[in-house]
Image (cartoon, rainbow, N blue to C red):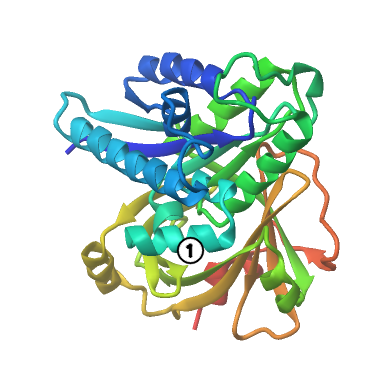
Amino acid sequence: MADITKIVITGGPCGGKSTAMSWIQNRFSELGYTVLFVPETATELISSGVAPWTCNTNLDYQTCQMTLQMEKEKIFLQAAEHMPGDKFLIVCDRGELDNKAYMTDEEFSTLMERLGWNETQLRDGYDAVFHLVTAAKGAEEFYTTANNAARYETVEEAAAMDDKLIAAWTGHPHFRIIDNSTDFEGKMVRLLSELVSFLGEPEPYEIDRRFLIEYPDIEALEKDPSCRKVEIMQTYLKSDPGTEVRVRQRGIDGSYIYYRTTKRQVSDMKYIVLEKRLTPHEYLEAMMEADITRRQIRKTRYCLTRGGQYIEIDVYPFWDDQAIMEIKLEREDQEFTVPEPFHVIREVTGDPAYKVAALAKI
């Protein structure tokens, strides 16, 4: 069967999505991928006269947009399954969960009831999500509405919408934010670097710094509108020395996605990571390979962004005074800050005693 990967390129208004599509097409065609682009549904509808201000209500419009988005993605997936080729990259110009940023919580809840879906299914239905920060945050002089007939936001509105979109996708297992810390060409290069790494061309890397922190204020995290809670059950499988293989059940409120991950350490903060989505049946089959010298690990993960940094805080049931914080980085020498109000006990990047595999040992 062909290898099909479906990703989302999202971001605030005037973030560079249109240009990114061209860069992705050129780069990944060279790497042997058949690249398919799912065009932005909102632009199609609004440019054709179907808009929040032409429909009876915003909820009616969002129902139309979400329904069309879902059908388009199904068609592109079906097409890839019946096209010649070994490697397919389906690139969605915005994903289904982008809609949430344009609705109230009540509207979004009603929409999910109408369609019979939930937030976890929408968010984790993609293999990876890449957010291009709007030019209205850090590159204001380049912000314009002239190149998109469906764009109408002011600089202030664009920046606020960027924050809402980041909040909507926070919690995805592979969510990366590409900011405006370099010029625009550098921004595109960083996007391609993240995507190349994710796809494993030539090898998929994951870079993070890990900290042992004081037990966080759980009530404050759960009230934070930009924070997402995820329940994870992690089982280690039998593997060769120097390699970790695990399967995960990941989700919340009875809606779960399953993964198999192979991980090999390159340096204290850099890992080669190969990840595959599993069906529930494949997950149960993999559990038969469980390493019985390690216990199953359950943890609650809180995902949030601070200052453009993507942060994960893992809370374990066997600790009531400490937790683990991971800060995801683009490169090993990248500068970062540990955000308030979290209190670091010490950095444990590269410390084998605080790897999850070590915590799982019986």
Residue 157 is situated, as x and y percent measured from the top left of the image, at 73, 37
- Depth check, front residue: 358 or 249: 249
- Depth check, front residue: 318 or 244: 318
Residue drawn at (40%, 48%), measured in percent from left and top? 63
Q: Secondary structure at mark 1?
A: helix
Three-letter code for the amino acid on which mark 1 is drawn: Ser
Instruction: Please indicate, yes or no, whether residue 120 appears anywhere in the rendered image.
Output: no
State left or right for residue 335 relative to residue 165: right
Residue drawn at (66%, 19%), measured in percent from left and top? 145
- Depth check, front residue: 43 or 138: 43
Where residue 255 sits, quadrant-wise, is: bottom left
Residue 319 is situated, as x and y percent measured from the top left of the image, at 67, 84
Instruction: Please indicate, yes or no, whether residue 189 appears anywhere in the rendered image.
Output: yes
Image quarter of the N terminus: top left
Residue identifier under label 1: 109
Q: How many marks?
A: 1
Residue 225 is situated, as x and y percent measured from the top left of the image, at 68, 62
Where residue 74 sits, quadrant-wise, is: top left
Where residue 120 sits, quadrant-wise, is: bottom left
State left or right for residue 117 relative to residue 13: left
Residue drawn at (75%, 17%), measured in percent from left and top? 142
Residue drawn at (47%, 29%), measured in percent from left and top? 46
Residue 277 is situated, as x and y percent measured from the top left of the image, at 33, 53
Whether 82 is drawn above or below 260: the answer is above
For label 1, count other residues whose C-alpha is less than 10 Å away and answer few (under 14), some (14-19) or many (20+): some
Whether 53 is drawn above or below 97: the answer is above
Whether 355 is drawn above or below 195: the answer is below
